[in-house]
């Protein structure tokens, strides 16, 4: 194979962006050969290509080597499983699934190691986050003691939520800011710092918008080594903040406003506390700042890496198997808030799926918005109740 033939399922907002990258040659050794959408109006700009109304037909068309899934969230699982079972390489938009049980089903369908299965976690290409991960995982920071991440620059208007009947509903999207916008940050969080052992959270549902899902979240996470973390996100604040602070034995790391600063202790804090003879002394410090010219290749870089993995065996920047961490964190935060309890990790995936099924059953009807909505009966939604 000299070129990877891509098919895209879902050519709404992000699907169209990915299509543009492929059609304009932004991704080397890749081409767009077919697209699929349930809305015929969305297919009109792609009249020069074979188009399909149903993903199953696209997947079995013989026109593609890889499928990129850019549909509403629940479809990621069912379409992904179908594509994997048909032998295609799969790249799915975030989140990989709405809830952990579906994520487990999806990952279980990836049985052929020759099939490349990735997730569109484009922020993993950002050199700032890559540097933070390197500092943490190399041990240069020492033991992490506390993490604080406030990401409230995901501001959205009522008009945004009105763009599709599936948006911001339990039935159509499965959650709000945690499953849609901040899923990027949850992925980065577990990618940089690993998974916690306990989660407690306060989620406000429809605090700032006329929606039924969460648009404001404050969570406390605990790690096995005693470290704690706070994670705060919202789509209702402007101007918003994106500030990440990491306190560790060897110093403090702060990332904000395109600036990454490391205040390094000459002697680790724990060692200095044990050996110093002065009551109010602190270790000497040096300051180091990291700057980068941009935030990496983002979506194009993920597409290129995915293509290179198929053609040349390049290691994936964002394997789909790692995407379940963000889903599990989002589920745990929602479940903690809904029940008022601390949630232990690993998450009881069947228990949360049952909780989500209750939310869907009690939800208000989805407003019809033509072919763009998810109001049509889809059998796969029943799976939420049994997995």
Image: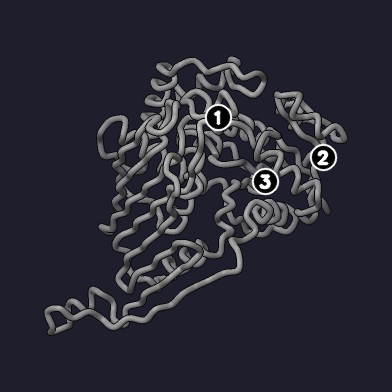
Disc 2 target residue: 33
Asked if the residue at tag 2 contacts the one at tag 1, i.e. Cβ–Cβ closer than 8 Å, the answer is no
Q: Residue at x 40, y 45 (%)?
A: 233
Coordinates of residue 126 in the picture (x, y in percent): 56, 60
Q: Residue at x 68, y 40 (%)?
A: 68
Residue 55 appears in the rendering:
yes
Density class for disc 1 (Cα within 10 Å; few <14, some 14-19, many ≥20) is many
Callout 3: helix, strand or loop? loop
Callout 2: helix, strand or loop? strand
Quarter of the image with the C terminus is top left
Judged left or right of residue 33, residue 263 is: left
Disc 3 target residue: 115
Q: Earlier in the sequence, mark 1 or mark 2?
A: 2
Residue 1 appears in the rendering:
no
Residue 280 position by quadrant: bottom left
Q: Is residue 112 above or below residue 174?
A: below
Give the distance between the C-alpha atoms of the residues marked 1 and 2, in whole angstroms.
Answer: 25 Å
Judged left or right of residue 379, residue 20 is: right
Q: Residue at x 59, y 21 (%)?
A: 374
Task: Report how many numbered discs are placed on residues in the image.
Answer: 3
Please tell me whether mark 3 or mark 2 is closer to you in this view. 2
Q: Is residue 336 above or below residue 53?
A: below
Residue 74: give its label.
Answer: 1
Asked if the residue at tag 2 contacts the one at tag 3, i.e. Cβ–Cβ closer than 8 Å, the answer is no
Q: Earlier in the sequence, mark 3 or mark 1?
A: 1
Judged left or right of residue 167, residue 371 is: right
Q: Residue at x 48, y 26 (%)?
A: 169
Coordinates of residue 238 in the picture (x, y in percent): 44, 46
Density class for disc 3 (Cα within 10 Å; few <14, some 14-19, many ≥20) is some
């Amino acid at each position: 194979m000299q070129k990877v033939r891509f098919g895209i399922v879902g050519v709404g907002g992000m699907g169209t962006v990915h299509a543009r990258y492929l059609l304009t040659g932004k991704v080397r050794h890749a081409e767009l050969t077919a697209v699929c959408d349930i809305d015929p109006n969305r297919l009109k700009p792609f009249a020069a290509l074979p188009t399909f109304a149903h993903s199953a037909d696209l997947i079995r068309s013989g026109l593609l080597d890889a499928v990129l899934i850019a549909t509403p969230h629940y479809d990621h699982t069912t379409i992904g499983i179908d594509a994997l079972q048909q032998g295609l390489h799969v790249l799915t938009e975030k989140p990989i699934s709405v809830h952990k049980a579906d994520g487990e089903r999806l990952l279980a369908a990836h049985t052929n190691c020759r099939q490349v299965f990735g997730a569109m976690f484009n922020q993993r290409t950002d050199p700032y986050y890559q540097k933070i991960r390197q500092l943490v995982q190399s041990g240069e920071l020492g033991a992490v003691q506390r993490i604080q991440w406030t990401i409230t620059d995901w501001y959205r208007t009522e008009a945004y939520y009105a763009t599709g009947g599936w948006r911001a509903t339990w039935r159509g999207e499965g959650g709000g800011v945690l499953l849609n916008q901040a899923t990027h940050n949850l992925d980065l969080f577990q990618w940089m710092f690993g998974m916690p052992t306990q989660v407690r959270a306060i989620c406000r549902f429809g605090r700032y918008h006329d929606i039924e899902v969460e648009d404001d979240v404050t969570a406390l996470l605990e790690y096995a080594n005693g470290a704690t973390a706070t994670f705060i996100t919202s789509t209702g604040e402007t101007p918003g903040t994106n500030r990440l602070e990491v306190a560790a034995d060897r110093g403090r790391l702060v990332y904000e406003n395109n600036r990454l600063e490391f205040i390094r202790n000459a002697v680790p804090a724990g060692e200095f506390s044990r050996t110093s003879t002065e009551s109010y002394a602190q270790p000497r410090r040096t300051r180091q700042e990291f700057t980068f010219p941009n935030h990496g290749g983002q979506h194009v870089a993920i597409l290129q890496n995915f293509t290179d993995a198929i053609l040349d065996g390049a290691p994936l920047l964002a394997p789909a198997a790692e995407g379940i961490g963000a889903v599990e964190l989002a589920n745990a935060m929602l479940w903690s808030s809904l029940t008022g309890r601390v949630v232990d990790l690993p998450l009881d995936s069947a228990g949360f799926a049952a909780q989500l099924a209750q939310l869907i059953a009690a939800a208000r009807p989805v407003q019809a918005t033509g072919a763009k909505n998810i109001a049509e009966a889809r059998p796969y939604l029943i799976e939420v109740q049994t997995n």
